Amino acid sequence: MGEFDLIKTYFSRHAQGEGVALGVGDDCALLEPASGQQLAVTTDTLVSGVHFLPDDAPRDLGHKALAVNLSDLAAMGARPRWLFLNLTLPSIDESWLAAFAEGLYALAERHGARLVGGDTTRGPLSFTLTAMGEVPPGQALHRAGARPGDLVCVSGRPGEAAAGLAHRLGHHLLPEDGSTHALQRLHRPEPRVALGLALRGLATSAIDISDGLAQDLGHILAASGVGATLELARLPSSPV
């Protein structure tokens, strides 16, 4: 299967649709942003052996490749619109591609995002996904907006994905019920898109904490020129 057949077979589902004047299949996509909106653009690369294990399920990888980008849009208060996927494959495995595409499309369609372009090439397994969203002028959430007296809030339970990875690698085995929960957080993270939209005009700053609560909170503090005190006893506890 050649590159163009691969794209047509697995990644052309969103070739047309709202806001897409020209989608997958040409040299460029032509997009029609809504009037009066700013574009929020983010990109992430996931590399086999670095960000995921070579035998991870392809459907989970398709989900995760998109989820990490949607989490960035959520942290800006942006509504997801368009996606671009660059996929590097060591070989063509059609069953792997079908499952990867289904994982990506299932999450994209839940959040109204459309895959409109990208590229494929041969090499060690990796994928780069770029996501574009819209946000009204003046309503984007920034890292630099925190002020003295603000309340520090977190969604979800920090550390669950890390616990899942430790279990997966055999470093710290969890009981069956705990491992199922932690592995779900590791392989199928849930982007907080609705929460990000709801926080427009309420939160002074926000950030995706996929690199860890302490490290990512530090980015907000540095950008905003403030400090913070965390009450560890009040952090959401995990069943694992």
Image (cartoon, rainbow, N blue to C red):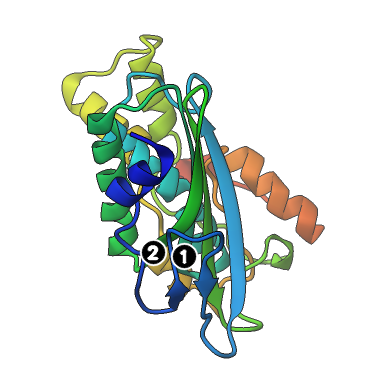
Residue 236 visible? The answer is no
Q: Residue at x 77, y 60 (%)?
A: 224
Which of the marked residues, 1 or 2, is nearer the chain's N terminus? 1
Q: Residue furthest bottom?
A: 35
Mark 1 sits on what residue? 82
Instruction: Look at the picture and state if 42 lies above or below 173.
Output: below
Tell me: 165 left or right of 153: left
Task: Please identify the quarter of the rendering in which residue 150 is found.
Answer: bottom right
Q: Which residue is at the front of the view, 46 or 117?
A: 117
Which circle marks residue 114 in the picture? 2
Q: Residues within 10 Å of mark 1 (few under 14, many from 20)?
A: many
Q: Secondary structure at mark 1?
A: strand
Is the residue marked by circle 2 packed among few (<14), some (14-19), or many (20+) residues within 10 Å?
A: many
Q: Relative to residue 200, is residue 173 depicted above or below?
A: above
Numbered disc 2: secondary structure: strand
Residue 15: x %, y % from top left: 36, 65
Q: What amino acid does circle 2 point to?
A: Arg
Q: Is residue 52 left or right of residue 167?
A: right
Pick out the residue farthest to the top. 170
Viewer-nearest residue: 65 or 7: 7
Q: Is residue 171 left or right of residue 98?
A: right
The residues tagged by marks 1 and 2 sit, at their Cα atoms, a distance apart of: 5 Å
Q: State whether residue 221 appears in this view.
A: yes
| Left or right: 126 as drawn, with respect to 189 | right
Position of the N terminus, as image quadrant, is top left
Residue visible at 74% across and 53% down? 221
Q: Contact (CB < 8 A) between labels 1 and 2?
A: yes
Q: Position of residue 64 (x, y in %)?
A: 39, 41
